[in-house]
Image: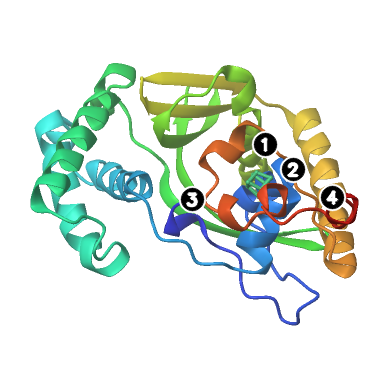
């Protein structure tokens, strides 16, 4: 998860959480223990080259729409990526690469991923309404805080777009990412009084675009799920009970080496039996 997504505020006391981001809500659904590592314990993990690519690409794509439409070319986007990296490198990712050659190879691969953007969208034909929009809204008892990548007005209504620089998972594994986007759609509905019509996940490493329509009934259901999730999170905090959910995600979970599901300590019963 990139630094731009870590939007929760520190707990006011050990037993409360003041805000919840759509990303962390998705984490709790996938694995409560993962949520605990990130949102409660706030365990720092070293940033990865993938996070560096994601954060830098998001900034470059944000800046792309500051340019006049005719200037939104691949060459200008690559230039913006280089500029964004220079801005971020020493502040957010110091010492990420051991050698200049490694950094250069990463940069070349990143530009290759970014070039795919032009295969899925023509930025000269698009004027986003908002980019990197800081959203903080109260929904019932919950304050949701997160950063929305992009929102545009299309002929049929508002569309919310989320950029991903990783490879697209099979569509069924994109459901948690859509849950986060539905939360953003809820916040937009609350803030503007308008219901977005579509949600779009744009995976540049592929590239692959997944889109789903949304309507008021779906967003009402998302709000009910979110309220139930918030209640579950608060119960987990009070009981200090965050179960592990081993699965496909564990293969790239940055907390795996400290996760109880993969602890090398023998279980007490096993130790007695041996
Ligand atoms: S390794 Fe797997 S079970 Fe453990 S915290 Fe990460 S996702 Fe959850």
In this view, 249 is above or below 37: above
Which residue: 66% across, 54% down?
259
Question: Picture quarter containing residue 85?
Answer: bottom left
Q: CA distance from mark 3 to mark 2?
A: 16 Å
Left/right placement of residue 22 relative to residue 77 reads: right
Is the C-beta separation of discs 4 and 1 under 8 Å? no
Which mark is first along the chain, 2 or 3? 3
Disc marking residue 29:
2
**Coordinates of residue 147 in the picture (x, y in percent):** 50, 53
Which mark is first along the chain, 2 or 4? 2
Name the residue beneath numbered marker 1: 179
Which residue: 61% across, 58% down?
258
Disc marking residue 1:
3
Name the residue beneath numbered marker 4: 274
Disc 4 is placed on an element classified as loop
Total tally of numbered discs in the picture: 4
Is the C-beta separation of discs 2 and 1 under 8 Å? yes
**Coordinates of residue 21 in the picture (x, y in percent):** 63, 55
Disc 1 is placed on an element classified as helix
Q: Taking the image as drawn, is residue 137 in sight?
A: no
Which mark is first along the chain, 1 or 3? 3
Is the C-beta separation of discs 3 and 4 under 8 Å? no
Q: CA distance from mark 2 to mark 1?
A: 10 Å
Q: Nearer the viewer, mark 2 or mark 1?
A: 2
**Coordinates of residue 219 in the picture (x, y in percent):** 75, 35
Which mark is first along the chain, 4 or 3? 3
User: Counting other residues with Cα less than 10 Å from the Cα at mark 3, is it few (<14), some (14-19), or many (20 or more)?
Assistant: some
């Amino acid at each position: 998860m990139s630094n731009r997504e870590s939007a929760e505020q520190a707990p006011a006391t050990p037993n409360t959480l003041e805000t919840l981001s759509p990303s962390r809500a998705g984490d709790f659904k996938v694995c409560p223990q993962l949520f605990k590592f990130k949102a409660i314990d706030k365990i720092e993990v070293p940033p990865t080259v993938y996070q560096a690519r994601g954060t830098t690409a998001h900034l470059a794509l944000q800046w792309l729409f500051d340019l006049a439409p005719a200037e939104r070319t691949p060459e200008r986007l690559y230039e913006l990526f280089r500029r964004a990296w220079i801005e971020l490198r020493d502040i957010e990712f110091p010492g990420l690469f051991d050698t200049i050659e490694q950094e250069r190879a990463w940069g070349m691969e990143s530009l290759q991923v970014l070039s795919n953007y032009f295969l899925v969208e023509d930025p000269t034909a698009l004027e986003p309404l908002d980019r990197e929009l800081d959203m903080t809204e109260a929904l019932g008892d919950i304050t949701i805080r997160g950063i929305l990548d992009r929102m545009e007005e299309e002929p049929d209504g508002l569309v919310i777009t989320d950029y991903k620089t990783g490879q697209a998972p099979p569509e069924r594994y994109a459901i948690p990412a859509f849950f986060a986007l539905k939360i953003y759609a809820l916040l937009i509905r609350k803030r503007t009084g308008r219901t977005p019509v579509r949600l779009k996940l744009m995976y540049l490493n592929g590239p692959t675009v997944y889109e789903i329509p949304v309507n008021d009934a779906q967003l009402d259901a998302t709000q009910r799920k979110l309220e139930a999730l918030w209640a579950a999170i608060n119960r987990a905090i009070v009981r200090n009970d965050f179960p592990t959910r081993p699965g496909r995600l564990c293969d790239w979970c940055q907390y795996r080496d400290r996760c109880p599901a993969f602890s090398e300590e023998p279980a007490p019963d096993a130790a007695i039996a041996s």
